[in-house]
Amino acid sequence: MGIWILNGQTVAADNTVTKKHFYIENDKIAQVVDAVDGSLPDTSGHEVIDAAGKLVAPGFIDMHVHLREPGFEHKENIATGTRSAARGGFTTIACMPNTRPVIDTVDTVNYILDKAATEGVVRVLPYGCITKNELGRELTDFAALKEAGVIGYTDDGVGVQSAQMMKDAMALAASMGMPIIAHCEDNTLVEGAPVTDGAFAKKHGLKGIPNESEAIHVGRDVLLAEATGVHYHVCHVSTEQSVRLIRHAKQFGIKVTAEVCPHHLVLSDEDIPGMDANWKMNPPLRTPRDVEAVIEALEDGTIDIIVTDHAPHSEEEKEKGMHLAPFGILGFETAFPLLYTKFVKTGKWTLGFLINRMTQKPAEVFGLPYGTLAEGSAADLTIVDLDTEREVLKEEIVSRSKNTPFIGWKLQGWPVVTMASGKVVWS
């Protein structure tokens, strides 16, 4: 017995809208039928999901998430994190290695993959560390980590401070056909600063994180990528200067790709209402000028994909205030509604553009066989109600943590059914 999804509206990257029926068998899309004439397939003996009036999209892909397990299960674990992802419409997520222990050994990779297989509800792809314990002193065993199943190497959470270490990592990764994913941050410029160097910092007498702390590493690394030939991917781009450097690198044919988070597209430091650490993240919310720069960069292809940087922290940690609370906010459950409401409903983007940057494009950037609704592809689908407006309510958040600045926002574009590998994992 398979599953029929009937009468779903689909949208292509060029924003062409069509109505289709999908037949799901096992973990694949077995059949796609045009539904233009109103005719229905024979569904007898099969489960039926009526998607009339709803969008059917490929399952969203998030290439930058924090599941916190092992070591920080009071914030999130693989079970709760993947359920939160499913509620947000995500079916493939890539988890960062700054856990405890960090993902720098085969044993830890195996732990992640085993937990994801037994307790997770969506596909989990682990990254491995660039350096042992993320200390920036010694490279991990890239070959062993690749064999174990990592999809790339990153010390996300900290920037690799040594240019020689980063060049060695890039050369080794390039020789293996693997990407380097970089958290770009010069530590000497950020210590003790909780927010960007902008209006909010000045108003509250806070030390600010300057834009160049990010851009210096971007500039260094694109030159190292050019020298080594590696696929270099820039995490959570947030500054005008970084955008300029990435755009320039792409013009010269350097193999660089980049990502941006919803919060850096919809918020600036001038939106922070007060000393509430649920607005503290890394990179921080930047100036309105930076926000316009990253929006333009996503629109013109300088920035390739959208990620959430889902970063759960407990309420007790966030209550420590702007100076002492950890950086990070939740991302899974509000990502699509935020961007749909802010950019598609207002006519700034097409729906096809947004869907592409959250599905097909991340699959292309990382060489993944997902992000499509074609016959024979993985049965990863998200059904979205584009019309109903709902408020972001703290008590409805599925994540183990609740740290988001978007509580109380009224949004449209809510995923109502998420199917991963042919199984309904959120409804």
Image (cartoon, helix red, strand yellow):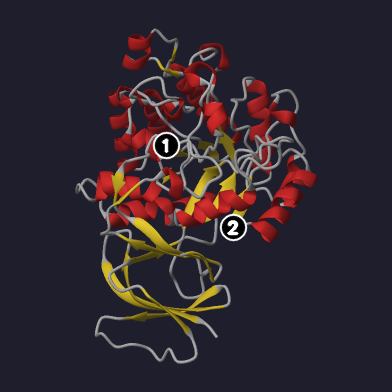
Which residue is the extreme one toward the front? 395
Residue at position x 37%, y 11% from top? Answer: 204
Q: Which residue is mark 1?
A: 250
Q: Which residue is mark 2?
A: 123
For label 1, the crowd category at 10 Å Cα-Cα, with few meaning under 14, some 14 to 19 and many 20 or more, is some
For label 2, the crowd category at 10 Å Cα-Cα, with few meaning under 14, some 14 to 19 and many 20 or more, is many
Residue at position x 28%, y 31% from top? Answer: 292
Image spot of residue 381 (x, y percent): 45, 65
Q: Secondary structure at mark 1?
A: helix
The quadrant the N terminus occupies is bottom right
Q: Amino acid at mark 1?
A: Lys
The reply to whether residue 226 is in sight is: no
Residue at position x 55%, y 51% from top? Answer: 93
Image: 281 above or below 344: above
Image spot of residue 77 (x, y percent): 63, 46
Indicate the quadrant where residue 287 lies.
Answer: top left
Front residue of 152/187: it is 187
For the residues marked 2 and 1, what is the alpha-carbon distance in whole angstroms?
A: 31 Å
**Horizontal relation, residue 140 to residue 51: left or right:** right
